[in-house]
C-alpha cells in the first residue's frame, strides 16, 4: 500500500469515528481506478471554505477558534 493510500485510509478511519456538532458526518468512501472519494452528509448553505473565503484573516481566525472551542 502506497503513502497516499495509507493516508487516505487513516483519514477515513479518523473521520468515521469523529463526532462533533460542528462536523459533517462521513457517510462513506469509495476507491476506484486510483480515485478516492469521501461521501459526507448534505448540509444546506454551502461549504465552510466558501463562507470563510469572504472573510478577512482576523475574522476567519476568530470564527475557527470559537468553532473548535465549542462542544
Image: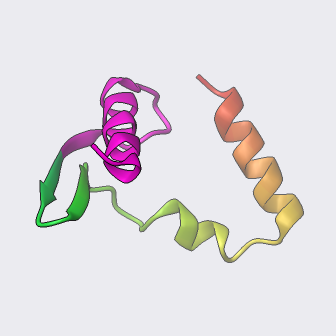
Compare residues 57 and 29 and report the one nearer the observer. 29
- Seen in the picture, residue 24 relative to 19 is either above or below; the reply is below
**Which residue occupies 33% across, 56% down?**
43
Q: From the top left corner, tell me how far across and down residue 53 is, in percent.
A: 66, 74
- Seen in the picture, residue 39 relative to 67 is either above or below; the reply is below
- Seen in the picture, residue 17 relative to 47 is either above or below; the reply is above
Q: Quadrant of the C terminus?
A: top right
**Which residue occupies 31% across, 48% down?**
5
Determine which quarter of the picture holds residue 34.
bottom left
Determine which quarter of the picture holds residue 24.
top left
List the single residue furthest toward the right.
58
Q: From the top left corner, tell me how far across and down residue 56 is, in percent.
A: 82, 71
Q: From the top left corner, tell me how far across and down residue 69 is, in percent.
A: 70, 28
Determine which quarter of the picture holds residue 6.
top left
Question: Is residue 7 covered in magenta?
Answer: yes
**Which residue occupies 24% across, 59% down?**
36
| Residue stretch rendered in magenta on the structure | 1-28
List the single residue furthest toward the front.
1
List the single residue furthest toward the bottom.
54
**Which residue occupies 84% across, 66% down?**
57
Question: Is residue 40 covered in magenta?
Answer: no
Compare residues 39 and 24 and report the one nearer the observer. 39
Q: Quadrant of the N terminus?
A: top left
Amino acid at each position: 500500500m502506497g503513502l497516499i493510500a495509507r493516508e487516505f485510509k487513516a483519514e477515513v478511519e479518523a473521520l468515521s469515528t469523529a463526532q462533533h456538532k460542528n462536523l459533517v458526518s462521513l457517510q462513506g468512501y469509495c476507491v476506484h481506478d486510483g480515485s478516492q472519494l469521501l461521501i459526507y452528509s448534505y448540509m444546506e448553505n454551502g461549504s465552510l471554505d466558501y463562507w470563510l473565503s469572504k472573510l478577512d484573516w482576523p475574522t476567519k481566525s476568530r470564527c475557527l477558534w470559537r468553532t473548535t472551542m465549542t462542544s
